[in-house]
Amino acid sequence: MTLESELSSVDPVEAKAEGLAREAGFDEDTSSQIAMVVREAVINAILHGNKKDPAKQVQVSYELNAEALRIKIADEGPGLDPDSVPDPLAPENILRSSGRGIFLMKAIMDEVHFHQLNPGTEIEMIKYRVKKELSA
Amino acid sequence: MSMTYTTRDVGGVTIVDLSGKITLGEGGVTLREEVRKLLGEGKKKIVLNLADVNYIDSSGLGELVSAYTAVKNGGGELKLLNLTSKVRDLLVITKLVTVFDVKDNEAAAVSSFA
């Protein structure tokens, strides 16, 4: 799915993610949370990645298999260093009005990976349909 | 659906009944404007009733924080009432539940103001 860099692109992606999450068997609250963090990632891609540049697009792909729901969102921006994002739980940051999006992605999904593209950043988010057994 | 709200006065406390979504470009700016308006009217005891807020994202959480900070800086107090499970979960995950005074009962929320 290819999106224009405008906020009207967000709702259809969120709806698609929620539908797939329900299809994967996640309960209503979990599906809503998955859809919400997909929304966060797409908004980040449009606002912070592509900076609403109409010449740039956002690519979204979904994969639902027996193991997991996997969603990838790629922008064409200057790149993102996820380690540079301040910890929103730190006392000095807790009252900031922004900066919680990536934290929520990591909290709600089982895995979040950042892949640097040339140009851009791809965020890969994975939610397992059955929790992986912890290895001994 | 975007956010709608009504305000009412209960014993000198302003209760803002919010309904819908608090997200980027939907409820967020509206909430910020309403809180500023209330402060401008000298209303400094504010309760945000979130019973009918069924959706919030990180921008919406940021708006709640902005509202809290604005009221505190204005010498007032802002409390949250009747969180839905979805909103409560996000406040717990982000530890904002430790920042806000959260009430589950309107009468208790009103009487909790000094």
Image (cartoon, grey):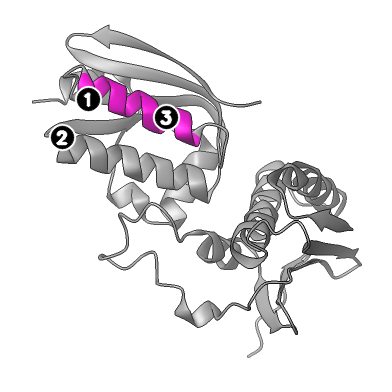
Tell me the residue at 52%/38% (across/down): B85
Q: Amino acid at mark 1?
A: Leu
Mark 2 and mark 3 on one chain: yes
Q: What stretch of residues is rendered in magenta?
A: B28-40
Residue B39, disc: 1
**Which residue is label 3 attached to?**
B31
Percent coordinates x, y for residue A62 in the rendering:
86, 63
Disc 3 marks which amino acid? Leu
The prevailing secondary structure element of the residues shown in magenta is: helix
Which quadrant of the figure contains the C terminus of chain A?
A: bottom right
Q: Are marks 3 and 1 on the same chain?
A: yes
Q: Amino acid at mark 2?
A: Gly
Q: Quadrant of residue A57?
A: bottom right
Residue drawn at x 69%, y 57% as measured from the top left: A42
- Write down the chain letter for disc 1: B
Specify whether residue B37 is painted magenta: yes
Which class describes the residues within 10 Å of circle 1: few (<14), some (14-19), or many (20+)? some
Same chain, labels 1 and 2 = yes
Instruction: Give the numbered dot on residue B74.
Output: 2
Magenta residue check for B97? no
